[in-house]
């Protein structure tokens, strides 16, 4: 009898511990609803991963885990001495982001390696103790703020340098390597978070990475205490990485994608996405009510590599044509019908249809059936960026888009008529604006 009682008590304590851990791991979200709504309206942001180990084109931070003593000694003591991004120009980054239709930036102030890309009093393992010796974070914040973009800071409470100096085995799973099992590390991270929240003016959002929810929650509390208006993204809301949910998530949420395979710049063996792929991801994510945070990785001198710069430029061209579709728009009642995705003008009967059609030749007219809409006598149709009047060098061709009702929805007829490239081979989606339509 006593044995069974002890077993029951033991089981109860085990379950209690399990539920305590589960409760601890559940994200705390003290973001103000109106601030989350503001964040969702931003829609598109630039993520920047950059640390001093970019000099070797390696994975950011993670090479320290499992590294030999000799490797760690050289990583910690030698690499900072050669980091001198003398071509870094934050204003160029900010102008490029704004031109691409991005509304906010998230900059890595400190990744898991513990190297601070800002002026900190907590450690000498920072940008100020390099040949460059200037506060990179301040320059980023000032430049993007000047361009009218919201300011976000990435911070990781994981800190391999701190563990190295402490004499703790560098890891991401052992209890002593994370904040809940290492109180000095916990205090250290909170002090750095206080610095970031007070040294650079108003911070609009904070992205808290790291291995455990406990540390992110502790840091989120620091942020909300200093500024109750700050939006904590990772650490409080859903931030899927390198994947788009199959179905819409309750807003706010933010999908994080790299432009290549790696977060930090990799000079060789890299596979970059096309701008077309990035555009398609943006359309799908916005149609599902989320934000796209698209990552770029500057090189060791502070420049965006040509592959990233070229893709960003193509994004800018597409957004220059279609920016209207992302201004004051919300998800439609259906995300898409086949390869046509939708956004709706807030409080209006205007729908933007993003046509993800491939192999569409300049001057070719195509028809598309949309079941979710019906037309009326006031319905108007147009293609963003084109007047619907002229097909270059073809005065006898009428490029005007048309719309008519069918037994099941509407039929739209659209021509690819806008000359964007010299060879007239524009591969990116066309956006059709349908005003004063009825919803089925």
Image (cartoon, rainbow, N blue to C red):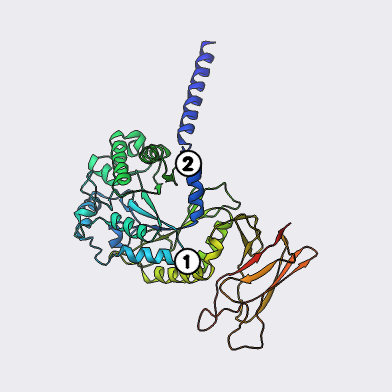
Asked if 161 appears above or below 434 in the picture, the reply is above
Q: Residue at x 38, y 38 (%)?
A: 215
Report the residue that reaches farthest toward the front: 378
Q: Pointer 2: what residue? A: 32
Residue nearer the viewer, 58 or 290: 290
The local secondary structure at tag 2 comes to loop
Which residue occupies 66% across, 85% down? Answer: 397
Which quarter of the rendered picture does the C terminus lie within? Answer: bottom right
Q: Quadrant of residue 78?
A: bottom left
Q: Residues within 10 Å of mark 1 (few under 14, many from 20)?
A: some
Q: Where 387 sits versus 109, above or below?
A: below
Q: Pointers 1 and 2 in contact (CB under 8 A)?
A: no
- Residue 7 at x, y percent in the picture: 51, 18
**Image spot of residue 364 (x, y percent):** 65, 80
User: Cα distance, mark 1 to mark 2?
Assistant: 35 Å
Image side of residue 177 versus residue 424, left or right:
left
Q: Quadrant of residue 157 in the image?
A: top left
- The residue where tag 1 is placed is 273
- Residue 74 in sight: no
Instruction: Tell me where residue 186 appears, x and y as whole percent.
Output: 32, 37
Residue occupying the far top of the picture? 1
Q: Is residue 150 visible?
A: yes
């Amino acid at each position: 009898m006593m044995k069974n009682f002890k077993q029951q008590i033991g089981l109860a304590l085990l379950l209690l511990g399990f539920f305590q851990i589960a409760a601890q791991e559940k994200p705390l979200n003290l973001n103000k609803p109106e601030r989350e709504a503001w964040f969702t309206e931003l829609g598109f942001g630039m993520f920047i991963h950059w640390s001093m180990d970019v000099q070797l084109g390696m994975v950011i931070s993670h090479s320290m885990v499992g590294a030999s003593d000799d490797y760690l000694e050289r990583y910690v003591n030698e690499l900072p001495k050669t980091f001198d991004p003398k071509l870094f120009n934050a204003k160029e980054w900010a102008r490029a982001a704004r031109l691409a239709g991005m509304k906010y930036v998230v900059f890595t102030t400190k990744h898991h390696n513990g190297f601070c890309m800002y002026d900190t009093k907590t450690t000498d393992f920072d940008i100020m103790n390099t040949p460059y010796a200037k506060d990179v974070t301040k320059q980023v914040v000032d430049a993007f703020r000047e361009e009218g973009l919201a300011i976000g800071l990435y911070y990781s409470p994981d800190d391999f340098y701190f563990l190295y100096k402490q004499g703790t085995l560098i890891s991401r799973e052992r209890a002593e390597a994370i904040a809940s099992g290492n109180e000095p590390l916990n205090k250290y991270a909170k002090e750095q978070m206080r610095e970031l929240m007070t040294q650079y003016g108003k911070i609009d959002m904070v992205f808290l990475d790291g291995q455990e929810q406990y540390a992110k929650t502790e840091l989120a509390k620091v942020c909300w205490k200093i500024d109750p208006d700050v939006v904590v993204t990772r650490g409080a809301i859903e931030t899927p990485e390198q994947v788009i949910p199959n179905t819409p998530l309750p807003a706010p949420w933010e999908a994080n994608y790299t432009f290549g395979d790696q977060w930090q710049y990799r000079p060789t063996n890299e596979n970059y996405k096309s701008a077309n792929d990035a555009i398609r991801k943006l359309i799908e994510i916005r149609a599902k009510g989320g934000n796209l945070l698209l990552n770029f990785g500057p090189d060791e001198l502070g420049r965006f590599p040509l592959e990233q710069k070229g893709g960003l430029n193509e994004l800018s061209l597409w957004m220059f044509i279609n920016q209207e579709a992302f201004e004051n728009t919300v998800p439609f009642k259906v995300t898409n019908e086949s390869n046509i995705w939708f956004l709706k003008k807030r409080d209006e009967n205007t729908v933007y249809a993003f046509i993800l059609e491939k192999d569409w030749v300049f001057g070719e007219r195509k028809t598309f059936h949309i079941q979710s809409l019906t037309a009326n006598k006031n319905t108007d149709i147009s293609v963003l960026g084109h007047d619907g009047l002229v097909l270059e060098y073809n005065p006898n061709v009428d490029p005007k888009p048309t719309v008519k009702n069918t037994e099941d929805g509407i039929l739209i007829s659209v021509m690819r008529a806008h000359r964007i490239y010299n060879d007239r081979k524009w591969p990116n989606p066309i956006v059709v604006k349908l005003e004063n339509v009825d919803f089925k």
